[in-house]
Amino acid sequence: MSNIVIVGGGFAALQTIKMVRKIDQDIAITMITADSGVEYSKPNLSHVFSQAQAPEDLTQHSAQQLAEQYNVVIKTKALVSEIDTEQQCVYVDGQSIHYSKLVLATGATPFIPPAEGLKRNATITLNSLEEFEKHKAQIDDAQRVTVIGGGLIGVELAFDLQTAGKNVTIIEPASYLLNSLVPPFVSLELERELTKAGVTVETDSAVCRATYLPDGVRLQTTSSRLIRTDIVIAAAGLRPNTLLATQAGINVSRGIVVDETMRTSAENVYAIGDCAEIEGRVMAYLQPAILSANVLAKRLTTGEGEPLLREAKLSLPHIITKVKTPSYPIQLAGRDIQTAQSWETRFDPKGIIAKGFNEENQMVGFIVTGQHIKAAFPLLKELQISSPS
Ligand SMILES: Cc1cc2nc3c(=O)[nH]c(=O)nc-3n(C[C@H](O)[C@H](O)[C@H](O)COP(=O)(O)OP(=O)(O)OC[C@H]3O[C@@H](n4cnc5c(N)ncnc54)[C@H](O)[C@@H]3O)c2cc1C
């Protein structure tokens, strides 16, 4: 009997279910998730402290509501421990569940950079509603906050916590913030805004030692600074959750490797979301998961050779990435933006408009900041014409 089993209960899993149900209302679906199976908007975690929100404020639907609405069996607080690709089953609490098609939507785990004395279990990460729930009281009580990592999530959280009245320090090993997304001339403007808001920005620096004291933590950095803090938050990147796949002999590189039809190297096993690696890249954003779910739903509901299946291939357009730092928003797009050889830039009091070009003078991306974010959509069209994806 057909039974689609989905491991994971995050955005990618739910998006897959919604898309499948648009095509087929009856096919059996079982979703197994280690968490409570609540639907919530993870990007909203970036502003929960400034808006004094509680976990309930982010909750959209309970697991029970989702199960009824989408006619799905949902197992919550259930950890899949093993996949048997020969028998086509997964194991949960010693029980085996058969699948006709299996979707791995296991997400990713925040990386905590190692440092002498730094306790992993005392280092806060905010990559799920449950982590927010677990750490909310401690973060609310803290006055001094240190954020390790000046990437997208790190700067968003730092801005939010500073706005909520905390004293925030960001520690970033690279020489500028958002270094994997924007060039220094954009980053320096952001740093100026963060500093103006009261955030201390430490670039070219990493935590090398942590000492836990009765009144907080003392951090020593590689740039010989001593920072006294109440809490440490790690926002230093994510590692795709690939263990189940690896143990089952499924091809894993940075993430679980999938082709343009979301298929892994094992028959009838697919992967989607933050755990998946598509065209050599792990794209931990919502938009790629939405596009992937459209393709995957067709794969899950259609037999080989049927016309719907022939169209079911992922093609990723240019996607706008938004940095949600309200007093200095940034939007950018362009797969090869980091390889831009030259920039056409306009700086004015409203912000920056920058277009990046390659050696052939072809536009490869753009960045807009401040009040110029309105220009993102026209520029996206220009980019699509100049370098179709
Ligand atoms: C603070 C923050 C802000 C963000 N802002 C944006 C934004 O503005 N725009 C944007 O596009 N993206 C943003 N993102 C990223 C986006 O939210 C993620 O890409 C997306 O939510 C990932 O969904 P997912 O389903 O792949 O993974 P997850 O949401 O991590 O879900 C993984 C699921 O797998 C389950 N699981 C894992 N292993 C097992 C197992 N063995 N057995 C059972 N269940 C298991 C987990 O319990 C969980 O339910 C943000 C992320 C964060 C943290």
Image (cartoon, helix red, strand yellow):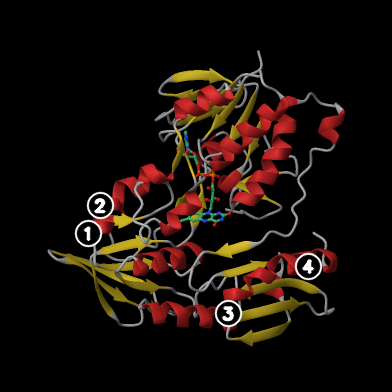
Which residue does the numbered mark 1 point to in the structure image? Answer: 141
Q: Horizontally, is 171 left or right of 290 in the view?
A: left
Q: Give the residue type at disc 3.
A: Val
Using the image, determine if residue 303 lies above or below residue 41. above
Using the image, determine if residue 235 lies above or below residue 17. below
Which residue does the numbered mark 2 point to in the structure image? Answer: 137
Say what secondary structure mark 4 lies in: helix
Q: Position of residue 17 (x, y in %)?
A: 61, 31
Q: Give the residue type at disc 4.
A: Leu
Say what secondary structure mark 2 lies in: helix
Q: Residue at x 56, y 39 (%)?
A: 105
For the residues labelled 4 and 3, the Cα–Cα distance comes to 19 Å
- Residues at marks 1 and 2 touching, judged by CB atoms closer than 8 Å: yes
Q: Residue at x 30, y 67 (%)?
A: 145
Farthest top residue?
Answer: 1
Q: Is residue 268 visible?
A: no
